Image (cartoon, grey):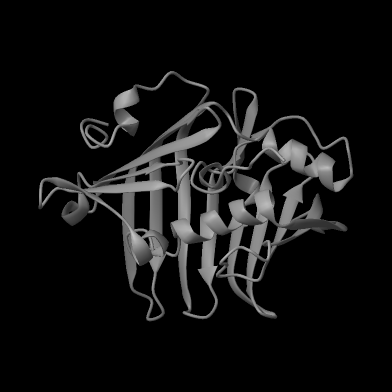
């Protein structure tokens, strides 16, 4: 089955084609979701607002660039604020033998490759992590997917999918439940289960659905960590899809320059 790229589903703001889901089977819903993925995307401003369990707030702003090369994702985010992180950059490159991740730290003026447990760490203190995104990808590409029926969410008709990772996968979550908007194919909610309990929930605001060329996207979403009592709201502004992007954004030697 053609793979669903993890970065597109979340960090690229859940882009989706304007056509509704015509085939009401599992394969039909997945085909519509696969069509979500544009060849490239540029987001002029990404805003992440993290709230800890005591009510403390931290906000990050930056730009995001992503492209598909031979069905593999290249994605880079450059941080503009706060001041202590300004100029930091983060690069993800999907590869056959294992994904590559790099971070540029301005204070050190050097690029570091992220390996081991650091790959699954929270992104700059938010509730989003690469491990969560990878879990969605693994469930779609190698696990079992079932259509649990239709329902309604925020007044919109949705398809409900249940995703289970393959037995061979080392999975943090035992199951993922996904609510897919029938009209736009945008993922409006995802719940990440640890055993019988929901550990994390991702919600996209249906009122923030916008269109960029032939694609729809959710301009606002929120990730809740129900165990830790933390949450992060993500907003995207100025989305452009299928645009020409310079290769320097995705080169480990140059990704942190400019942007």
Which residue is located at x 80 percent, y 35 percent?
20
Q: Nearer the viewer, residue 46 or 120?
A: 120
Q: Would residue 50 be seen by someone viewing this image from the given angle?
A: yes
In the picture, measured across the screen, residue 108 lies left or right of residue 53, that is: left
Counting from the top left corner in percent of width and height, residue 49 is at 39, 59
How many numbered discs, if any?
0
Q: Quadrant of the N terminus?
A: top right
Looking at the picture, tell me which residue is in the foreground, 51 or 159: 159
Residue 204 appears in the figure = no
- Horizontally, residue 83 falls left or right of residue 136, namely left
Q: Residue 5 appears in which quarter of the rendering?
A: top right
Residue 27 picture location, percent across and down: 82, 42
The residue at 55%/77% (across/down) is 226
Q: Quadrant of residue 80?
A: top left
Quadrant placement of the C terminus: top left
Instruction: Identify whether 162 is placed above or below 242.
Output: below
As drawn, is 188 to the left or to the right of 250? Answer: right
Residue at far top of view: 244
Residue at the image position 34 percent from the left and 21 percent from the top: 246
196 lies left or right of 127: right
Residue 51 location, quadrant = bottom left
In this rendered view, identify the residue nearer to me: 123 or 111: 111
Residue drawn at x 70%, y 80% is 196
- Residue 106 % position (x, y): 14, 48
Could you tell me residue 225's position as x and y percent?
A: 51, 72
């Amino acid at each position: 089955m053609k793979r669903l790229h993890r970065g597109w589903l979340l960090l690229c703001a859940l882009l989706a084609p304007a056509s509704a889901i015509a085939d009401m089977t599992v394969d039909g819903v997945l085909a519509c979701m696969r069509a979500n993925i544009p060849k490239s995307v540029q987001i002029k401003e990404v805003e992440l607002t993290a709230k800890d369990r005591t009510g403390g707030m931290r906000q990050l702003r930056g730009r995001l660039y992503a492209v598909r090369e031979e069905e593999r994702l290249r994605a880079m985010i450059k941080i503009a604020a706060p001041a202590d992180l300004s100029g930091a950059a983060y690069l993800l490159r999907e590869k056959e033998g294992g994904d590559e991740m790099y971070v540029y730290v301005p204070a050190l003026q050097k690029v570091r490759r992220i390996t081991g447990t650091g790959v699954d760490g929270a992104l700059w203190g938010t509730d989003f992590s690469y491990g969560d995104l990878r879990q969605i990808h693994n469930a779609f590409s190698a696990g079992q997917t079932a259509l649990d029926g239709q329902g309604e969410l925020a007044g919109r008709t949705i398809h409900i999918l249940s995703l289970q990772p393959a037995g061979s996968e080392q999975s943090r979550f035992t199951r993922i439940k996904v609510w897919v908007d029938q009209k736009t194919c945008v993922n409006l909610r995802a719940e990440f289960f640890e055993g019988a309990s929901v550990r994390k929930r991702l919600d996209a605001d249906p009122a923030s659905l916008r269109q960029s060329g032939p694609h729809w996207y959710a301009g606002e979403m929120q990730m809740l960590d129900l165990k830790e009592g933390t949450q992060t709201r993500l907003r995207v502004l100025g989305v452009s899809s299928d645009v020409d992007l310079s290769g320097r954004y995705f080169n480990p030697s140059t990704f942190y320059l400019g942007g």
